[in-house]
Amino acid sequence: MTGFGKQNMAVLVLREADDITTLLRRALDTAPAEERPGLERAMALTAEAGAVPDAELRGRWALRRMASAGYEGPPRAVAAVKALRTAERSLSLLQAVNLSKDAEAVTMGAKEDAQEEAKDGA
């Protein structure tokens, strides 16, 4: 029976944070004092970016692709999956559904962050 085997994700997350950190560390080793703060900040930002989970990166990508197809509704809706498949024709239905789940997790995390900030500001 075909169609029910394990399907690979069509979205590949590329991570170059380790390579960038290595280059920044080398630059920091030979940098004059006035350049060190900027390089140290760049290393911190690279470490922060490298710590983002793959699912979050896929979710952000899916949200951007949905938006590019003109979709602005909730990420787990049937219309969201359709928008993803319209924007990226190579996605299977299963892949689009999984990406919509990643996108929903990103939006839920953003809502929770906003609620925490509102509490802290009150």
Image (spheres, rainbow, N blue to C red):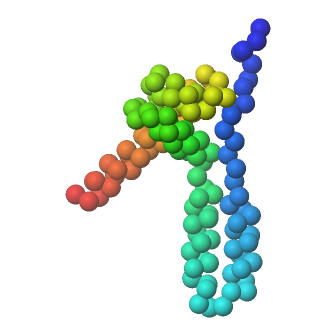
Residue 19 in the image: above or below residue 103: below
| Position of 92 relative to 113 (above/below) | above
Q: Quadrant of the C terminus?
A: bottom left
The percent coordinates of residue 90 (x first, y second) are 67, 29
Q: Give the camera-side residue of 41 and 66.
A: 66
Could one spot residue 75 in this view of the protein?
Answer: yes
Which x, y percent locates residue 49?
A: 59, 59
Instruction: Please give the count of numbered marks on the rendered protein.
Output: 0
The answer to whether any part of residue 105 appears in the image is no
Examine the rendered structure and indicate whether residue 108 appears above or below residue 5. Answer: below
The extreme left residue here reads 122
The residue shown at (69%, 33%) is 9
Q: Please name whichever residue, 98 or 96, is drawn nearer the observer in this view of the structure.
A: 96
Q: Residue at x 74, y 64 (%)?
A: 19
Looking at the image, residue 122 sits to the left or right of residue 83; the answer is left
Q: Residue furthest bottom?
A: 33
The answer to whether residue 26 is left or right of residue 53 is right
Instruction: Specify the quadrant of the image occupied by residue 43.
Output: bottom right
Residue shown at the point (43%, 41%) measured from the top left = 107
Residue in view at x 65 percent, y 24 percent: 92
Work out whether residue 104 or residue 68 is closer to the camera in this orientation and state it.
68
From this viewpoint, which residue is outermost toward the right?
A: 1
Q: Position of residue 40 (x, y in %)?
A: 60, 77
For this orientation, the residue located farthest to the top is 1
Image quarter (top left, top right, bottom left or bottom right) of the N terminus: top right
Answer above or below: position of 62 versus 76: below
Can you give x and y, in whole percent of width and height, for residue 78 in the image? 47, 22
* Quarter of the image where one finds residue 91: top right
